[in-house]
Image (cartoon, rainbow, N blue to C red):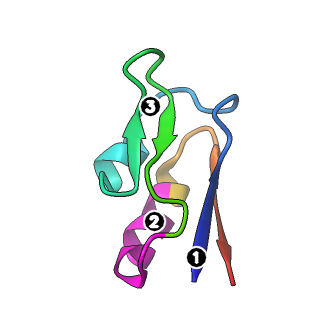
Amino acid sequence: MTRIVVDRDRCIGAGMCALTDPAVFDQSDDDGRVVLLDAEPSPEHDSTVRDAVHVCPSGAIKSIEG
């Protein structure tokens, strides 16, 4: 199972995560920074979560396998 951790202080609000997997990530209406919708997404999201981690320009998203 994959667990997602986000660092909202590091997030710059680029929105790539929300575009990559909107079922797992969103953006705050207040400041545009990442909102984690599902910290332990189902395995069907593994590929898109990896993509979101990779495309995040600030490195604010981490996935922990285990």
Q: Which residue is mark 1?
A: 2
CB atoms of marks 2 and 3 within 8 Å? no
Residue 37 horizontal side relative to residue 63, left or right: left
Q: Which residue is mark 2?
A: 49
Q: Say what amino acid the circle numbered 2 marks.
A: Val
* Range covered by the magenta-colored residues: 41-52
Q: Say what amino acid the circle numbered 1 marks.
A: Thr
| Location of residue 48 in the rendering, given as x and y in whole percent from the top left corner | 38, 67
Q: Residue 14 got which mark?
A: 3
Specify whether residue 26 is painted magenta. no
| Mark 2 / mark 3, whichever is N-terminal | 3
Specify whether residue 45 is painted magenta. yes
Q: Quadrant of the N terminus?
A: bottom right
Q: For marks 2 and 3, give the CA distance.
A: 16 Å
Is 66 located above or below residue 8 in the figure?
A: below
At a point 45% along the width and 70% down the height, the residue shown is 41
Q: For marks 2 and 1, give the CA distance.
A: 9 Å
Is 21 located above or below residue 34 in the figure?
A: below
Q: Say what amino acid the circle numbered 3 marks.
A: Ala
At a point 38% along the width and 41% down the height, the residue shown is 26
At a point 53% along the width and 58% down the height, the residue shown is 54
| Mark 2 / mark 1, whichever is N-terminal | 1
Q: Secondary structure at mark 2?
A: helix
Q: Quadrant of the C terminus?
A: bottom right
Q: Quadrant of residue 58?
A: top right
| Mark 1 / mark 3, whichever is N-terminal | 1
